[in-house]
């Protein structure tokens, strides 16, 4: 039986983490549905809910303290985000990512994010550089959890001018979410992440040297890509057999 066919449901550790997240998200929301979505997304990105884990709506509703309807709606939205998948017989599970899929995500991210950075550099202002410095320092102060995810998202949305290029930003953010659990939440590729600070990228952007800035961004994405692939290949081997190595194009 494959690891996915034997997908576990929410265990004691996941249950405790969900309840803790529910307590943190208990106030300040315009709707129960948005709150439930944020709780479940944080649980997946933090590793409280693992790839392949079965997501029983009634169990999740009880742990969070809501009815099943907002849970169902949140799971459908998370499916659109690429974090959850539905199976006809087993219901919703946390989506797994193969090494080949992760490699493809990073290949596409490289194309989109390099183009987004080039567009930003063509219209760069001193005000934007100052804002990036402020957001970069805030992001580097965060180390884990939802605050870390939010801080990085805010930094990159400014860097890629999400307000004026919402379609491009949405595509980038969707791809970032697909691998977010391995980088933003679990922090299992810490060496690759900690070797990159936002300050390094900001200084390259502030220099107005486009190729320098693109080089810093590219090196970072390729480095994290390799670390994520190593992690996924190790998981695949533990699950029943070595996965073929997916090499990074240079």
Image (spheres, grey):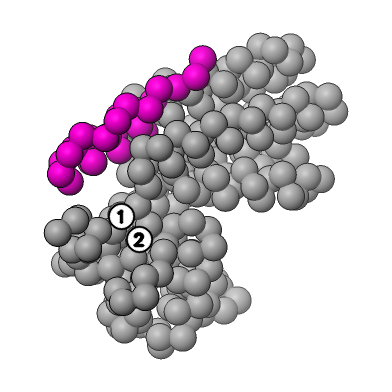
Q: Nearer the viewer, residue 129 or 4?
A: 4
**Is the C-beta separation of discs 2 and 1 under 8 Å?**
yes
Which secondary structure lies at badge 1?
loop
Residue appearing at x 57%, y 50% in the figure: 174
Q: Which residue is mark 2?
A: 94
Q: Nearer the viewer, residue 85 or 33?
A: 85
Badge number at residue 97: none
The spot of residue 195 in percent (x, y) is: 42, 20
Instruction: Report the side of 32 relative to 3 (left or right).
Output: right
The spot of residue 20 in percent (x, y) is: 31, 66
Q: Which residue is mark 1?
A: 51
Residues in magenta?
A: 226-250
Whether residue 199 is visible, yes or no, is: no
Residue appearing at x 28%, y 68% in the figure: 54
The spot of residue 78 in percent (x, y) is: 48, 64
Which secondary structure lies at badge 2?
strand
Instruction: Report the side of 226 relative to 10 (left or right).
Output: right
């Amino acid at each position: 039986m494959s690891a996915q066919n034997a997908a576990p449901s929410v265990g004691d550790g996941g249950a405790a983490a969900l309840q803790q997240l529910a307590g943190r998200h208990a106030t300040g929301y315009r709707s129960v549905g948005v709150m439930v979505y944020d709780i479940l997304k944080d649980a997946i990105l933090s590793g409280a809910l693992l790839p392949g884990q079965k997501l029983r709506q009634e169990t999740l509703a009880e742990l969070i303290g809501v009815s099943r309807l907002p849970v169902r709606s949140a799971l459908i939205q998370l499916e659109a985000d690429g974090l959850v998948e539905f199976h006809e017989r087993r219901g919703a599970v946390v989506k797994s990512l193969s090494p080949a899929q992760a490699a493809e995500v990073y290949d596409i991210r490289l194309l989109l994010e390099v183009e987004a950075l080039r567009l930003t550099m063509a219209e760069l202002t001193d005000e934007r550089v100052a804002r990036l410095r402020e957001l970069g320092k805030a992001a580097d102060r965060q180390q884990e959890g939802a605050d870390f995810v939010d801080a990085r998202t805010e930094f990159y949305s400014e860097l890629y001018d999400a307000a004026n290029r919402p379609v491009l930003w949405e595509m980038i953010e969707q791809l970032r979410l697909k691998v977010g659990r391995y980088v933003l939440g679990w922090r299992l590729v810490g060496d690759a992440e900690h070797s990159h600070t936002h300050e390094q990228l900001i200084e390259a952007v502030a220099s107005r040297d486009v190729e320098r800035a693109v080089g810093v961004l590219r090196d970072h994405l390729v480095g994290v890509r390799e670390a994520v692939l190593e992690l996924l290949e190790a998981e695949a081997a533990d699950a029943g057999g070595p996965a073929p190595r997916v090499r990074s194009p240079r």
